[in-house]
Amino acid sequence: TQARPATATAKKEAGPVLTFERTPCFGICPGYLMQVYTDGRVAYEGRRAVPIMGKKNLKLPAAAVADMLRQANEAHFDQFQDRYSRNTSDLPSTIIAVRQPNGQLKTVVVEEGEPDNVRMFVTHLAKQFDALAQLGGVDK
């Protein structure tokens, strides 16, 4: 009977620990979704105005994932509001979800009007994920 809790724990940990999504706008805003796992696997889906369209498996160093989670903790992501918006139409959203210690994903939608600490966290993640999505071209 002890194998059952271990299996339940393994299933909980098998899900993404962080998701990062950019929604499109009426213009040419990039639209993509990335689901990040602790081992660095990234399930990517390019939706609009991105160089990589469709579903792809990408990879980040596991240390980079751990660093993102550490930064979420330091930014007090668990205390962020669920939504930052002023109801302006046609703004792209950035949607971030981070797995909390209780196993639940906390989701935050950022459109506009977010405080500086939220903006800095979103911008930091956006730079990393935009680079992974090859936005701005490949400079290698």
Image (cartoon, grey):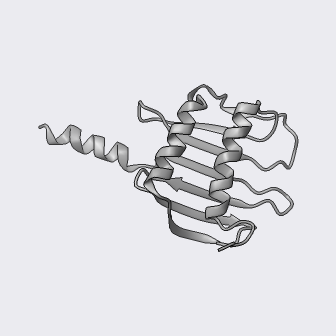
> Going 51% across and 38% down the picture, which residue do you hit?
70
Is 68 rendered above or below residue 35?
A: above
Q: Nearer the viewer, residue 46 or 87?
A: 46
Residue 84 sits above or below residue 122 on the image: above
Residue at the spot 51% in from the left edge and 66% down from the top edge: 58
Residue 19 screen position, x and y as percent = 56, 49
**Could you tell me how many numbered marks the image carries?**
0
Measuring from the top left, give residue 3's x and y in whole percent: 15, 42
Compared across the picture, whether 139 is left or right of 100 comes to right
Q: Nearer the viewer, residue 129 or 11?
A: 129
Give percent across and percent down for residue 39.
Answer: 40, 55
Tell me the quarter of the image containing the C terminus: bottom right
Determine the residue positioned at 69% across, 53% down: 22
Residue farthest to the front, as pictured: 140
Pick the residue in front: 68 or 49: 68
Left/right of residue 5 with respect to residue 45 in the rendered view = left
* Image x and y of residue 1, in percent: 11, 37
Q: Is residue 136 above or below residue 120?
A: below
Q: As drawn, is 10 to the left or to the right of 109?
A: left
Residue furthest toward the top?
79
